[in-house]
Image (spheres, helix red, strand yellow):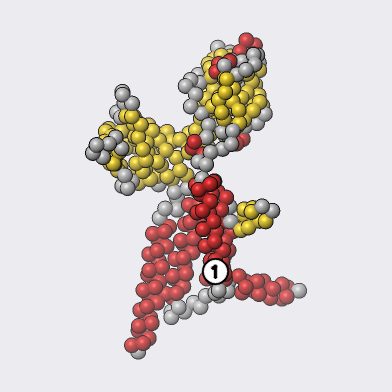
Amino acid sequence: MLQKTLQNCRKLALAVARADAPFYLLPPLMLLLVAGTLAQGPMGLYAAQKKFFSSFIFWTGPVPLPGGYTLIGLIALSLLVKFLAFSEWSRRRAGINLSHFGVLILLFGGLLTATGAKESFMVIPEDTESRYLYDYHQRTLYIFENDVLKLSKPFNELKLRITGVPFDLIVQNICSNCAIVKRANEGNYHGMAKFMALESTPPSKEPEADLPGLTFSIAGLKDQDGTYIAFEGMPEPITLYANEKEYKIIFGKRQSMLPFTIRLSDFEKEIYPGTDKARGYSSDIVIVDNGLEWPARIEMNKPLRYKGYTFYQSSFEQTDKMQATILSVVENKGRLFPYIGTLIITAGLLLHLAFVMRGRTA
């Protein structure tokens, strides 16, 4: 019985590690690439990427089809089984084996990037400093107690009732993309809910253009009980008082913190002659880390890399009184793997070429 099981496992491994297995997977992978690219027009970049590339399966009507994770995973599995179980470990095949190992490094780096890379942005006015990052897509409900964060709830995890503070917050309605309309009925409304309401609308092609929000009620604070609304970009937080403490409710982009601080010394922009369109812009910054400071410059197509973070000059904000830089921030633990994998593949090909030339000479 054991011998038969081992034989079946070997047959399965041989089928997975066939040399032509990746070539059968490349055509559907190319079709997926074309379909995902064409879908970016009607669906938007973010939605198309999630559906076609960052998925194991996606549905075309009632038919399930393999997504990008599935196809790439099968190719990686085939190469891994072939490399570990069926490679010829000899000096003559050292270059080929090294090249195969480099390809596996590339695929592993892609897996780290796909599952672990984090994209966010930061806004820094001139002559100020910041270490706060704001997520492009994720929103969070924050409750502060005397300006100290008491609790936070991600938007996609909001429950019917939120406790943990001296009052109950009961969620009545959530909309991923809200339309602000004039309130028609009267009732026990507070704050901006007295004269406006939130209604759900279809999502935009790009999530950054959506206006998420929620309608909720407060219970347990007597004269402060009633219905409130909160949405991204509210001019002021919702302020409540309980047990001689001040509570602020803020709804907005999910925040995180850098392990260091960035200070904007100067922001410069170049304008196309005769227009108000920016040709390029750059930021002169100072990195403050554990009491040490040193200057750096971030320009378009010239990012700054520091402690696993990459800062790109993305955009800017300008008013009559101030101007601020907007930096895109990417934290990618797999950033070095493409370089390492490429070097290993190159070394393997050169080694294999050396053995071939040596054999011909002999």
Looking at the rendered image, the quarter that the C terminus falls into is bottom left
Viewer-side residue, 51 vs 154: 51
Viewer-side residue, 42 vs 344: 42
Asked whether residue 293 is in view, the answer is: no
Mark 1 belongs to which amino acid?
Answer: Pro
In the rendered image, the vertical position of residue 203 relative to residue 66, given as above or below:
above
Determine the image quadrant of residue 84.
bottom right
Q: Around disc 1, counting alpha carbons within 10 Å, would you say few (fewer than 14), some (14 to 19), or many (20 or more)? A: some
Q: Farthest bottom residue?
A: 362
For mark 1, give the secondary structure: helix
Q: Farthest left residue?
A: 273
**Residue 276 shown left or right of residue 187 in the figure:** left
Determine the image quadrant of residue 122.
top left
Q: Label 1 belongs to which residue? A: 22
Asked whether residue 299 is in view, the answer is: yes
Viewer-side residue, 50 vs 88: 50
**Residue 8 shown left or right of residue 290 in the figure:** right
Q: Farthest top residue?
A: 223
Residue at the location (49% across, 77% down)? 89
Q: How many marks?
A: 1
| Image coordinates for residue 226, horizontal then vertical, percent | 64, 16
| Image coordinates for residue 333, horizontal then vertical, percent | 45, 50
Residue at the location (56% across, 63% down)? 28
In the rendered image, the vertical position of residue 176 relative to residue 219, given as above or below:
below
Residue at the location (60% across, 18% down)? 183
In the rendered image, the vertical position of residue 326 relative to residue 150, given as above or below:
below
